[in-house]
Image: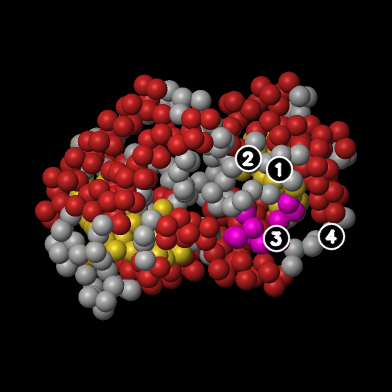
Amino acid sequence: MKRAKIHFFCNGIFGTNVAGGDIHFLKSARAAAEEGYELNYFGGQAFRKIIEAYNLPGTVTLTDDAKMAEVNQGSLRGQLAMFRDFYGRYRRSLELCGRVTPDDYVYATSDYWFDAIPVVRCPARRKLMIVHTQAPGLMQIVRRGRPDVDVKRLASLHFFLSQKYALSRFRSCPNKRLLYVHPAMQPAFLRMDYDESELFFTSEGFDLAAAENTPAQPKQFDVIWIGRVHRQKGIEDLLATLAYLAGKVPDFRAILVGKVEGPLRPQIEALGLQKHVSFAGVVLSETEKSRLLKASRVFLMPSNFESWGIVIAEALASGIPVVAYELDAYRPIFGNLLRYVRPFDLRAFQQEALDEVNRARAGQTWLDAASLQAFKQAHSWQATQKRFLQALNSFTDR
């Protein structure tokens, strides 16, 4: 059955590598297409390459003339260049909003101003927006009280102001649905006078099919870590734990996945760990990521801050135990499926990691099958897509 058109505003995508929230949006778009909705995307040249690569149906309303050149996102100059690029796509979106009709749906794929404000201002009567991460508070930014706040603070301040403004403006829309990925987010939205009927939990989602379709692998690595080099990822604790395990576990081997070899190899060599640690680089294939996970015994998660933890979900789906600091975000999602360690007790983390490696080498497992199956069913891409469609189909004036 052919349904109305839905316009996805995705102006924040400026590169051709996608992760996290971008994948969530692409999965949501595919679900809408399979449900019979006609799709259009307001996005840039980089995004057009992405939908071609992912073979997604729909048309693209281009909001820029060229893909943004690569910049150092950690520098002030790079952040200003990104802001100018976002602003250009935002202005073009406003100019082209006349192509949206009142009978269409519109969906802001982020809560940044360059997606949210065009959605608020366009003539469509049915509007949706998603929140993936709650921004740090103003005092957290000033005091660097959250590990994702960098020393310059500009990106975090931009995030804080953008989210606050977007949620305020979106709240004024009469016929709206606000999607969110973590159960702990809902109380804050209720305090902002959103009605409970307007709020839809969708989960961040993960690729369960890739894990289930990847066969069991011979164990090559004692531990695996997937991530990026950032203050919030607990890199110092990760390296200290690798050194500790190398001194305790015979023939210890670890693999690090991500764009991390450049900054981390000198530290690995300084610790004398080069024969123990391998670098896999950026792994774009979900099947290959699942293979590496299943070829490992334990997943280490020494992060100081996470808003969800997709890599944890992928590790659990691959059947390997996870050792993690007990961050606020984890229990509402993962329950008792993790080996939690008191934040940020490095010695306890190292000991728990050692215990898990030894148990895994002995062929012991403690993951509760029933709890793991319930988690998979609640947070797989299939479940996430179903919840997105429930939000989309919940409007009474379709």
- Quadrant of the rendered image containing residue 391: bottom left
Q: Is residue 25 visible?
A: no
Which three-letter amino acid code belongs to the residue tagged 1? Pro
C-alpha gap between disc 3 and disc 4: 15 Å
Mark earlier in primary sequence (1, 2): 2
In percent of width and height, residue 317 lies at 63, 61
Tell me how far mark 3 sits from mark 1, CA to CA: 17 Å
Residue at (45% x, 43% y) in the render: 135
Q: Residue at x 48, y 30 (%)?
A: 142
Q: Is residue 332 above or below residue 299?
A: below
* Residue indicated by mark 4: 364
Left or right relative to 126: residue 29: right
What amino acid is found at the position of numbered circle 4 in the picture? Gln
| Residue count near mark 2 (Cα–Cα under 10 Å), binned few <14, some 14–19, many ≥20 | many
On screen, residue 199 above or below 245: below
Q: Which residue is mark 2?
A: 304
Residue that mark 1 sits on: 343
* Residue 121 within the magenta-colored segment of the rendering: no
> Could you give the CA–CA distance between mark 2 and mark 3, rounded to whole angstroms?
19 Å
- Magenta residues, as a range? 330-340
Q: Relative to the observer, which residue lies in front, 118 or 242?
A: 118
Q: Mark 1 and 2 residues: CB-CB less than 8 Å, in contact? A: yes
